[in-house]
């Protein structure tokens, strides 16, 4: 998604959303729907269903914005939880758990998709993200995008739980470092 | 509290990733409110993950945004009603309607045995009773008809007996009455087996006929009684076609009647007898 020039600060955006302002929601959708849709797609692996869940998730965000508490975390973290849980619920309703077999494929796909809108800043960030070591990236994607617990990721990848935890922590330190501007 | 040690534990990352337990979640939310350093550190983690996610964003088909935003209502007034307009609530309303209708159907299923079965049972019983009643009625009616026929027969028999009794009583009374002249009229050549008796009360000149045997008259023919007075036939009236077993009252006779005779004449009789058609005759 386009990383727009942030004409909203986080506080302003949240305030406008809570006032049910259409422009704020358009901004929210234009800037964040791609990231949310990416997570949903990775969990569901079904584009048609992913679109339905995307609808549900965004409408849930709109409907429940009053329950969002900025003191507990950033808006995106809250939204991502809604999107991911919606997708996981949809998968569970199919009695299917997202498998590991296509994670690499998904990663490749999303990485390709992620390059669709190059801009100087995203190219820089993309380059930074790509410096994440693959074994850390896979874990981050499993846990962050697909809602795996660290124990599940440990079993799925056949990596000791301690290793999973340390790798994720290291990946996040790297990310913090990259994005700490 | 050792802030840096807490940060190094990695729990803020786990919190941001959404993989903490409810207890840990509450702990992080509490501590980040108390310690601004923790809050700042959490912000950094969240921003990093956010950027990571944004970097991996994929384009959403354009129709999805249109579909979503047509379901949304905006503005302060719509804010309160936003929940009502959301598809989740519409879905829930649909479910509610489903749940509402299901109990009604179940109620109907439950109540059907209560009155429906009773109704069916009642109608079955009614049908059975109706059939039984109809059968009973028809049986009774046929029995009644039979009885009525029997009663009628009995009445007829009674009447016949009564008529016969009256007839016999009248005969006996006439035979015992000294005023009555018994005139026997035996059959002639035309009807040799015929026999008719004339009971002539010579006081009152009343004449009764006792037909004991006469051939049934052909169609269009009727028997006619005559007396011979002074050598001339005098009309005494027509005999009923139903002449058997009873006394037939005829015209009053002339005191000078010398004989009685019956001829077979055309219906309604004739002023003078057809001598060839005389069936019985008796002299006084």
Image (spheres, grey):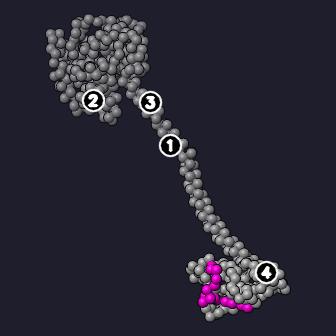
In the image, B143: left or right of A85?
right
Tag 3 and tag 1 share a subunit: yes
Q: Nearer the viewer, mark 1 or mark 4?
A: 4
Q: Secondary structure at mark 3?
A: helix
Residue A51 rendering spot, x and y as whole percentages? 26, 26
Chain of residue at mark 4? B
Name the foreground residue: A53 vs B258. Answer: B258
Chain of residue at mark 2? A
In three-dimensional space, the C-alpha distance between marks 3 and 1, rounded to whole angstroms, equals 20 Å
At horizontal 16% and vertical 16% (from top left) the residue drawn is A117
In the image, A45: left or right of A61?
left
Q: How many marks?
A: 4
At horizontal 73% and vertical 91% (from top left) the residue drawn is B283
Q: Nearer the viewer, mark 3 or mark 2?
A: 3
Mark number displayed over residue B205? 4
In three-dimensional space, the C-alpha distance between marks 3 and 2, rounded to whole angstroms, equals 24 Å
Q: Which residues are magenta?
A: B269-283
Q: Nearer the viewer, mark 4 or mark 3?
A: 4
Name the foreground residue: A84 vs B3. Answer: A84
The residue carrying pointer 3 sits among few (fewer than 14), some (14 to 19) or many (20 or more) residues within 10 Å by Cα, namely few
Identify the residue position indicated by label 2 in the image. A49
In three-dimensional space, the C-alpha distance between marks 2 and 4, rounded to whole angstroms, equals 129 Å
Identify the residue position indicated by label 3 in the image. B96
Mark number displayed over residue B7? none
Residue A93 rendering spot, x and y as whole percentages? 34, 33
Q: Answer yes or no: is residue B81 visible.
A: yes
């Amino acid at each position: 998604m386009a990383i727009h020039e942030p004409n909203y600060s986080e506080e302003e955006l949240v305030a406008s959303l809570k006032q049910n302002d259409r422009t704020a929601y358009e901004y929210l959708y234009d800037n964040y729907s791609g990231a949310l849709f990416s997570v949903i797609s990775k969990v569901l692996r079904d584009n048609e269903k992913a679109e339905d869940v995307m609808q549900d998730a965004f409408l849930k965000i709109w409907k429940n914005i009053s329950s969002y508490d900025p003191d507990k975390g950033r808006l995106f973290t809250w939204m991502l939880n809604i999107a991911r849980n919606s997708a996981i619920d949809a998968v569970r309703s199919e009695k299917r758990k997202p498998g590991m077999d296509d994670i690499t494929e998904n990663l490749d796909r999303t990485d390709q998709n992620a390059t669709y809108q190059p801009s100087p800043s995203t190219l820089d960030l993309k380059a930074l993200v790509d410096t994440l070591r693959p074994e850390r990236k896979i874990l981050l994607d499993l846990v962050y995008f697909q809602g795996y617990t660290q124990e599940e990721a440990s079993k799925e990848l056949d990596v000791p739980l301690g290793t999973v935890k340390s790798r994720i922590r290291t990946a996040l330190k790297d990310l913090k470092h990259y994005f700490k501007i | 509290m050792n802030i840096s040690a807490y940060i190094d534990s990695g729990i803020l990352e786990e919190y941001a990733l959404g993989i903490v337990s409810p207890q840990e979640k509450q702990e992080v939310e509490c501590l980040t409110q108390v310690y601004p350093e923790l809050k700042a550190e959490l912000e950094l983690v969240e921003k990093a993950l956010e950027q990571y996610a944004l970097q991996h964003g994929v384009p959403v088909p354009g129709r999805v945004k249109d579909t979503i935003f047509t379901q949304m209502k905006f503005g302060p007034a719509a804010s309160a009603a936003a929940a009502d307009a959301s598809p989740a609530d519409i879905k829930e309303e649909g479910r509610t309607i489903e749940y509402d209708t299901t109990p009604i159907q179940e109620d109907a299923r439950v109540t059907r045995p209560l009155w429906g079965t009773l109704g069916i049972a009642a109608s079955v019983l009614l049908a059975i009773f109706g059939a039984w009643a109809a059968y009973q009625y028809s049986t009774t009616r046929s029995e009644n008809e039979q009885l009525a026929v029997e009663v009628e027969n009995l009445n007829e028999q009674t009447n016949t007996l009564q008529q016969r009794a009256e007839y016999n009583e009248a005969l006996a009374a006439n035979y015992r009455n000294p005023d009555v002249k018994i005139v026997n009229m035996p059959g002639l050549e035309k009807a040799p087996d015929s026999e008719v008796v004339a009971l002539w009360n010579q006081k009152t000149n009343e004449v009764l006929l006792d037909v004991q045997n006469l051939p049934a008259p052909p169609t269009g023919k009727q028997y006619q009684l005559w007396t011979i007075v002074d050598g001339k036939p005098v009309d005494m009236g027509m005999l009923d076609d139903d002449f058997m077993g009873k006394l037939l009252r005829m015209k009053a006779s002339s005191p000078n009647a010398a004989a009685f005779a019956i001829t077979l004449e055309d219906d309604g009789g004739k002023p003078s007898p057809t001598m060839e058609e005389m069936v019985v005759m008796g002299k006084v």
